[in-house]
Image (cartoon, rainbow, N blue to C red):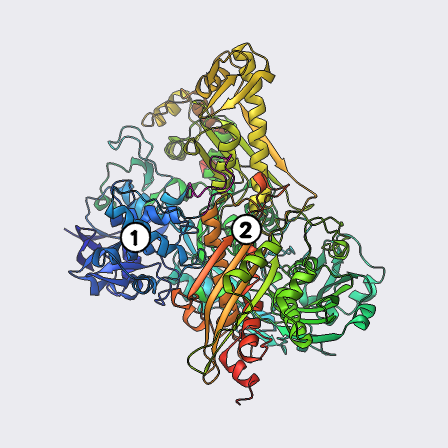
């Protein structure tokens, strides 16, 4: 049907099926900023429009309902290429990060300000209440509105700083300048994978297992294949016999190769059974319903306890192989294998035992814990359980791939372009030169896009059929066929003296990796390796065992294993302090590390090999604790006027890492273009985190040029050099340092060439802003334009290009402290986070405003898993919470009443311009800080996620 | 005016409903995604859009879709994987006939039509056979040689 409407002030005939969603029609008609994050659930607001003068979800309007309507999309905010003042303020405030629905937030705020030029905080909240922001939190949106108000009242400028400034001597690093790609993102440019898809793309539908654990006896695809428009059907019976795993980790990986594209055994509800490639989505869906699968169900196991039981069903019972380090009794071990289970191949031993459902194990420590416990005046020994939660990026996993020039091209939303290239090449059994991965803008990653969860299948299907394929997970698939936080059971035994000295810590970590072993050693390792080194304690030991089960798959999630370790270890410290009758903050101060302290504990914390002992580097931990205590008025008991509301305070001290020294590797190139401007080619993957801006700022500082003559291309495996990827908080430290080295290399080449051109000595030359080589001896100046022009002229010596590679044995560890003040209604169990203060030492924050927003965003994610989010499975292992409403992510109304992030000024020796990582660490604090605050308020320690009113009331003996 | 035109493209039944004056090339490229059919001039001069219509070489940019009702159309996508098609494509690659490549799908269609009617053409006949196809890169010599190679190598294949 054709519907007449006025869109962005212009009369338009919108064409489509009458029951088609208005969003789909608008997107197809070129209004591509109107996106879908929730499969038309009406939750995330990526589809927000102004419809007949009201904010509406365009996904919830059918085309026929739009007849005669007046519609505004975010495209209406642009004047030519110019973004409006709200959009400018958003970029400046640092809230435009992964930006999948940033244009919609801009539209909502613009609409608000048109009707209400001076909105209150509650009115701003109301305007944003239908828009889910996962990356940057909501706090700086209030700031952006203040900026707009000032801009409108004066000369269009704002004096409001979006963050503090650091390092007087630098022009861009440490200054809130806004992201270099901020305007493009907030204006809704065609930057995401879905925007690149051509109309000839084929569809793929994945038929998934209804059983949590079953052998596939047979698959009959004959009826489906007969359907017109079906191109191919891939199953366990015709896919390549190649074992790999989906974790995007550096090769050789510390995860087992325990799967093929399709397996003869399904191991979770939602596991892949068949992929149908067809001309349209409708045909693919219909064809997959015609596939007949015969299953032989097996009893599943869902929890660590079930998996470890004697005689428990085995999730993997296949043939075990080792690329290196095979044990002598392997043949004997394999005599019990069931060949239908396939294989498990280790690159090196992970101390696993699949015949006991053990995917990996490790242990280690220092000192003598028994002696330590004997010296203690009190000991606590408690077990803390974390739940299964999902990253929920607004843009689900998506891939568009095709053959071009005999090569496989994949346009991806990924954190790890080079791991995608390697793993797709492996699955297709082709060399890496045949694969080209292009990382588009990423609409949120948070760890889930560290794993190659769809690119393996899409890449293979394209290579096999020769057809271009566009595939995107549904929101439900994001929950049950994706990656999630490993649920963990962390037992902590901690002993201490009356004076607050901790004498011994023991951690017993049991992790649930689900059906496959992605990150099965390293995520759980992080529960100890990112927590124990914060303590100045002589006797510490940990045991770790990870189990296979039949829950939905797990993998990387921002913070990795650390949020779970911190929930256990800080809660235990709080419980010990309560037991000893001392202040937990005093106990923390007495037992934390400081700069120079030798970290003996690292010896036992290497991931699969012996770690190196290094001293603590730059460390703002004590300052963070002191500032947080002052801000929250630690020690002062708050009372509510309503006796049912009890108020308490809690805190957590935290750390993370900055990449993986000894494992990660980044490369970059910086080119002087012919007119003297700069192009940075970085292997790093910007996920909306501002990594490209970091590379640009670093190059601008080293080369002494204005930031706007530096452009960045990144994450394209053809044009950029190798980088292990954006995970483990490596971006700033690794990719940033690679850009720094490349810029320095270019600088030395420019000086050398300039010396020849100017007839001067290299030692007398310096680079001078805004783009000159200057002789300190003669005072002569040479512009970069002339320098580059002459270098590339017919008689020149060649283009000036700098190359940089970064590897390091040195750690740049970010530290911090999070404080919470919580009120609990002891009659109803209602919990309110009144105050949340996140204080972090990120070294030199290169983009301070983006750093602050990332802290807010990460803290909101962790408040989410602490209080609301939970993947609930039924007794058969089927995930029941497969949309945002049921899963319960926090929105603007769940933000703490008083929410502040502060950057502690510390300069690091190894980070680029002193910078360390920023956002992963911010996931670590909320759970233990809120748990302690609740215990302070009510006396009840809730030791499992999510912390609910029900659990508190139970602890109070109310039922 | 709307009408329904039924024809076959690369052996697949195709039903077009719409304006019968729509150019065949637009239906092939836009609706059927057969992008091997190239538009060079839009006036039947350059041959980049050449397809076979019931065995005859035609330029699809000047044929209205209404004129192909009941016809069998073959594009490069329909012949390139056949034995004969492969024979020509391989000969073009080996013979160095391909430079920028834009004219090549049409050129291959012309060669195909030629060899179907004249399995062993001489130089003159080959030049006649591709006289409706413009190539701006190669100067035609290597294309002529490649068609000769396809004719020799195909041998009896072309006499079937």
**Residue that numbered label 2 is attached to:** A904
Residue A150 x/y as whole percent: 28, 48
Q: Is residue A247 above or below residue A568?
A: above
Q: Is residue A554 above or below residue A829?
A: above
Where's the C terminus of chain B, which quadrant?
Answer: top left
Cα–Cα span, label 2 and label 1: 47 Å
Residue A734 x/y as whole percent: 60, 43
Which quadrant of the figure has residue A896? bottom left
Question: Dot 2 lies on which element?
Answer: loop
In the rendered structure, find residue A397 and report the number of the disc placed on it.
none
Q: Is residue A749 above or below residue A167?
A: above
Does the magenta run of residues contain A167? yes
In the rendered structure, find residue A28 and report the number of the disc placed on it.
1
Chain designation of label 2: A
Disc nearest the viewer among 2 and 1: 2
Where are the magenta residues, as a range? Answer: A164-180
Residue A260 x/y as whole percent: 62, 59
């Amino acid at each position: 049907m054709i519907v007449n409407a006025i869109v962005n002030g212009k009369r338009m005939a919108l064409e489509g099926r009458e029951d088609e969603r208005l969003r789909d029609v608008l997107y197809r008609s070129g209004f591509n900023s109107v996106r879908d994050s929730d499969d038309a659930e009406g939750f995330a607001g990526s589809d927000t429009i102004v419809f007949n003068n009201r904010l509406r979800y365009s996904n919830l309007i059918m085309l026929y309902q739009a007849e005669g309507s007046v519609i505004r999309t975010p495209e209406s905010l642009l004047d030519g290429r110019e973004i409006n003042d709200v959009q400018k303020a958003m970029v400046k405030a640092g809230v435009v990060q992964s930006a999948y629905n940033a244009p919609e937030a801009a539209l909502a705020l613009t609409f608000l300000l048109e009707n209400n030029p001076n909105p209150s905080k509650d009115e701003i909240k109301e305007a944003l209440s239908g828009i889910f922001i996962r990356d940057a939190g909501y706090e700086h949106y209030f700031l952006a509105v203040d900026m707009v108000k000032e801009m409108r009242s004066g000369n269009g400028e704002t004096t409001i700083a979006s963050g503090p400034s650091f390092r007087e001597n630098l022009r861009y690093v440490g200054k809130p300048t806004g992201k270099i790609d901020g305007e493009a993102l907030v204006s809704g440019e065609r930057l995401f994978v879905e925007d690149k898809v051509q109309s000839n793309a084929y569809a793929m539908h994945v038929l998934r297992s209804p059983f949590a654990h079953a052998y596939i006896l047979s698959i009959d695809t004959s009826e489906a294949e007969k359907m017109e428009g079906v191109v191919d059907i891939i199953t366990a019976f015709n896919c390549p016999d190649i074992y790999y795993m989906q974790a995007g980790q550096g090769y050789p990986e510390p995860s087992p190769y325990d799967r093929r594209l399709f397996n003869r055994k399904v191991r979770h509800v939602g596991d892949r059974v068949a992929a149908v490639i067809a001309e349209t989505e409708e045909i693919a869906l219909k064809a997959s319903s015609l596939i007949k699968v015969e299953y032989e169900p097996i009893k599943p196991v869902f929890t660590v306890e079930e998996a470890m039981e004697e005689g428990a069903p085995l999730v993997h019972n296949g043939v075990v192989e080792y690329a290196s380090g095979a044990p002598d009794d392997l043949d004997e071990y394999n005599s019990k294998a069931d060949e239908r289970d396939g294989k498990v191949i280790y690159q090196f031993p992970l101390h696993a035992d699949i015949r006991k459902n053990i995917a990996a194990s490790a242990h280690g420590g220092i000192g003598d814990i028994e002696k330590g416990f004997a010296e203690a005046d009190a000991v606590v020994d408690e077990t803390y359980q974390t739940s299964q939660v999902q990253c929920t990026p607004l843009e689900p996993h998506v891939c568009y791939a095709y053959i071009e020039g005999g090569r496989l091209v994949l346009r991806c939303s990924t954190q790890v372009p080079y791991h995608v290239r390697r793993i797709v090449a492996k699955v297709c059994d082709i060399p890496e030169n045949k694969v080209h991965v292009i990382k588009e803008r990423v609409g949120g990653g948070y760890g889930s896009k560290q794993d190659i969860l769809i690119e393996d299948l899409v890449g293979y299907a394209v290579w096999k059929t020769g057809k271009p394929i566009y595939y995107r997970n549904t929101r439900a698939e994001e929950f049950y066929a994706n990656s999630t936080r490993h649920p963990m059971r962390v037992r902590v035994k901690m002993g201490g003296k009356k004076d607050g000295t901790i004498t011994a810590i023991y951690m017993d970590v049991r992790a649930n990796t689900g059906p496959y072993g992605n990150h099965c050693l390293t995520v759980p390792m992080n529960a100890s390796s990112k927590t124990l080194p914060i303590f100045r304690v002589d006797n510490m030991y940990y045991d770790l065992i990870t189990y296979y089960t039949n829950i939905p798959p797990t993998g990387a999630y921002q913070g990795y294993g650390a949020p779970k370790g911190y929930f256990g270890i800080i809660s235990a410290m709080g419980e010990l302090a309560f037991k000893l009758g001392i202040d937990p903050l005093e106990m923390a101060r007495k037992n934390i590390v400081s700069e120079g302290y030798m970290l003996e504990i690292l010896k036992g914390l290497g991931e699969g090999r012996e770690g190196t002992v290094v001293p603590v580097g730059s460390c703002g931990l004590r300052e963070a604790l002191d500032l947080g205590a002052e801000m929250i008025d630690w020690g002062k008991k708050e009372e509510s006027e309503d006796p049912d509301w009890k108020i308490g305070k809690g805190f957590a001290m935290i750390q993370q890492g900055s990449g993986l020294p000894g494992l990660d590797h980044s490369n970059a190139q910086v080119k002087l273009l012919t007119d003297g401007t700069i192009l940075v080619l970085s292997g790093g993957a910007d996920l909306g985190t501002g990594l490209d801006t970091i590379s640009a700022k670093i190059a601008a500082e080293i080369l002494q040029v204005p930031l706007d003559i530096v452009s960045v291309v990144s994450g394209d495996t053809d044009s950029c050099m190798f980088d292990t990827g954006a995970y483990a908080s490596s971006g700033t430290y690794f990719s940033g340092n690679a850009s720094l080295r490349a810029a320095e290399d270019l600088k030395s080449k420019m000086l050398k060439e300039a010396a020849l051109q100017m007839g001067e000595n290299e030692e007398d030359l310096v680079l001078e802003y805004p783009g000159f080589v200057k002789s300190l001896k003669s005072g002569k100046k040479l512009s970069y334009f002339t320098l580059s022009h002459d270098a590339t002229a017919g008689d020149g010596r060649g283009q000036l290009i700098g190359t940089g590679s970064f590897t390091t044995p040195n750690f740049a560890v970010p530290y911090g402290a999070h404080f919470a003040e919580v009120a609990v209604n002891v009659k109803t169990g209602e919990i309110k986070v009144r105050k949340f203060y996140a204080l972090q030492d990120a070294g030199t924050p290169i983009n301070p405003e983006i750093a602050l927003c990332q802290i807010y965003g990460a803290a909101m994610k962790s408040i989410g898993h602490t209080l609301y989010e939970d993947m609930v499975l039924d007794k058969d292992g089927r995930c029941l919470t497969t949309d945002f409403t049921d899963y319960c992510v926090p929105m603007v109304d769940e933000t703490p009443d008083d929410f502040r992030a502060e950057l502690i000024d510390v300069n690091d020796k190894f980070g680029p311009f002193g910078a360390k990582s920023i956002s992963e660490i911010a996931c670590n604090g909320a759970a233990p800080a809120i748990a302690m605050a609740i215990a302070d308020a009510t006396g009840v320690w809730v030791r499992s996620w999510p912390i609910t009113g029900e659990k508190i009331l139970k602890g109070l003996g109310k039922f | 005016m709307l009408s329904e035109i039924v024809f076959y493209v690369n052996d697949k039944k195709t039903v077009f409903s719409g304006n019968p004056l729509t150019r065949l090339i637009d239906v092939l490229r836009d609706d059927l995604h057969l992008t091997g059919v190239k538009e060079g001039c839009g006036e039947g001069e350059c041959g980049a859009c050449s397809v076979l219509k019931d065995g005859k070489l035609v330029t699809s940019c000047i044929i209205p879709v209404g004129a192909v009702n009941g016809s069998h159309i073959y594009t490069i996508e329909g012949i390139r994987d056949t034995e004969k098609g492969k024979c020509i494509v391989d000969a073009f690659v080996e013979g160095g006939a391909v430079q920028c490549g834009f004219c090549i799908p049409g050129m291959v269609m012309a060669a195909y039509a030629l060899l179907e009617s004249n399995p062993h053409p001489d130089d003159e006949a080959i030049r006649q056979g591709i006289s409706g196809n413009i190539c701006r890169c190669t100067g035609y010599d290597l294309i002529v040689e490649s068609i000769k190679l396809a004719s020799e190598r195909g041998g009896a294949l072309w006499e079937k």
